[in-house]
């Protein structure tokens, strides 16, 4: 029998205790550990693009990462954190969503994703929901979990990479004109501006960007907004976008509204949702079509 993803959390964490682990290797080792039959190993999701067991291993790893027990090291690889080792040293009988709820980071993730942490990965409608309602709820949970993962990666990224991400996102959203529509400036002598988007061929109309890669719990204050406003004045522009992986304090938001320049604030959760919506740093793997009867055809 294929174990549920919560039952895989502790085994995944134990595998990572031995060193950096490749996710595909973890799947193979756990297939052997749980003595899956050949049919169970090859059973696919309805999409036909991934095995059910591999999907559950990926979700187990994702939840452990959101709680801070694992971290990504490079593409397709992960390792245990110090907190993860401390958990294993305590020899818990089971690690599941209830166990992970002791961590603020995991609670924050659940709040963002709208997840209880206990739902199965397959869509199983309850008596109170229709199949299409259950599918939409599951879609929102997957999208929000993806956004949370993207935000976590952005907070760990190098500043120069993060600044480039913001310019890439704005261009993907339709801002900018021509082949040289956006540039990263983030360096000494940039007068507090990290990027610029040209809105016309000559660059007469421009939007300047400030990007701050902060951890959760370190909100941007009003002083940073005033500094950015001053930087816009030095550039003689009136449009600016201030982006952070953290959040903005109420005073910061009030300051942005009061200043003469038009400054748009984008916090971490909004940034991640925009990246998902515009497929920046992620890609579509499955598309589901829901059809209904065309009543007029049968009239």
Image (tube, rainbow, N blue to C red):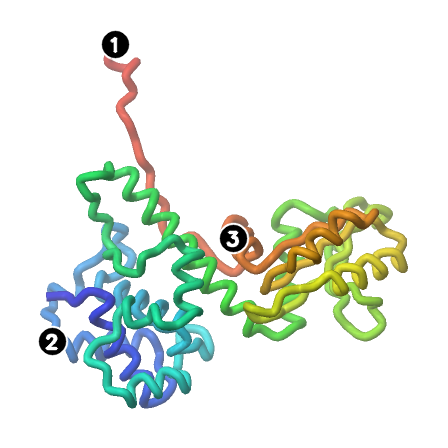
* Mark 1, other Cα within 10 Å: few <14 / some 14–19 / many ≥20: few
Would you name the residue on which mark 2 appears? Answer: 35
Instruction: Measure the C-alpha gap from mark 1 to mark 2.
Output: 55 Å
Left-right relation of 173 to 290: right
- Residues at badges 3 and 1 in contact (C-beta under 8 Å)? no
The quadrant of the rendering that contains the C terminus is top left
Instruction: Measure the C-alpha gap from mark 3 to mark 1.
Output: 43 Å
Name the mark on residue 273: 3
| Residue 287 in sight here | yes
Camera-side residue: 145 or 29? Answer: 145
Q: Image point 44% across, 56% down: which residue?
A: 112
The quadrant of the rendering that contains the N terminus is bottom left
Name the N-terminal-most of marks 1 and 2.
2
In this rendering, is residue 47 above or below 62?
above
Name the N-terminal-most of marks 3 and 1.
3
In this rendering, is residue 293 above or below 156?
above
Name the mark on residue 299: 1
| Viewer-nearest of discs 3 and 1 | 3
Q: Position of residue 293 (x, y in %)?
A: 26, 23
Is label 2 in a helix, a strand or a loop? loop
């Amino acid at each position: 029998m294929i174990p549920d993803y919560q039952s895989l959390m502790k085994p995944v964490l134990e595998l990572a205790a031995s060193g950096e682990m490749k996710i595909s290797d973890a799947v193979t080792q756990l297939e052997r550990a749980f003595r899956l039959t050949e049919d169970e190993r090859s059973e696919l999701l309805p999409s036909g693009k991934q095995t059910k067991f591999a999907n559950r291993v990926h979700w187990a790893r994702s939840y452990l990462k959101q709680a801070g027990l694992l971290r990504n090291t490079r593409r397709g690889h992960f390792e245990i954190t110090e907190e993860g080792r401390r958990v294993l040293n305590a020899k818990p009988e089971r690690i599941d969503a209830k166990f992970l709820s002791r961590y603020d980071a995991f609670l924050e993730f659940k709040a963002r994703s709208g997840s209880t942490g206990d739902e199965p990965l397959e869509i199983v409608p309850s008596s109170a929901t229709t199949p299409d309602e259950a599918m939409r709820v599951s879609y929102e949970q997957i999208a929000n979990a993806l956004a949370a993962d993207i935000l976590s990666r952005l907070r760990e990224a190098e500043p120069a990479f993060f600044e480039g991400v913001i310019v890439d996102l704005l261009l993907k959203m339709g801002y900018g004109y021509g082949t040289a529509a956006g540039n990263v400036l983030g360096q000494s002598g940039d007068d507090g501006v990290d990027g610029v988007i040209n809105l016309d061929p000559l660059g007469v109309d421009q939007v300047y960007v400030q990007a701050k890669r902060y951890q959760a719990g370190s909100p941007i204050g009003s002083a940073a907004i005033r500094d950015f406003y001053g930087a816009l004045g030095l550039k003689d522009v009136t449009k600016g976008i201030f982006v952070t992986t953290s959040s903005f304090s109420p005073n910061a938001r009030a300051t942005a509204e009061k200043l003469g320049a038009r400054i748009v604030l984008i916090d971490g959760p909004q940034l991640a949702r925009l990246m998902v919506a515009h497929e920046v740093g992620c890609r579509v793997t499955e598309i589901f079509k829901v059809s209904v009867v065309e009543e007029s055809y049968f009239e």
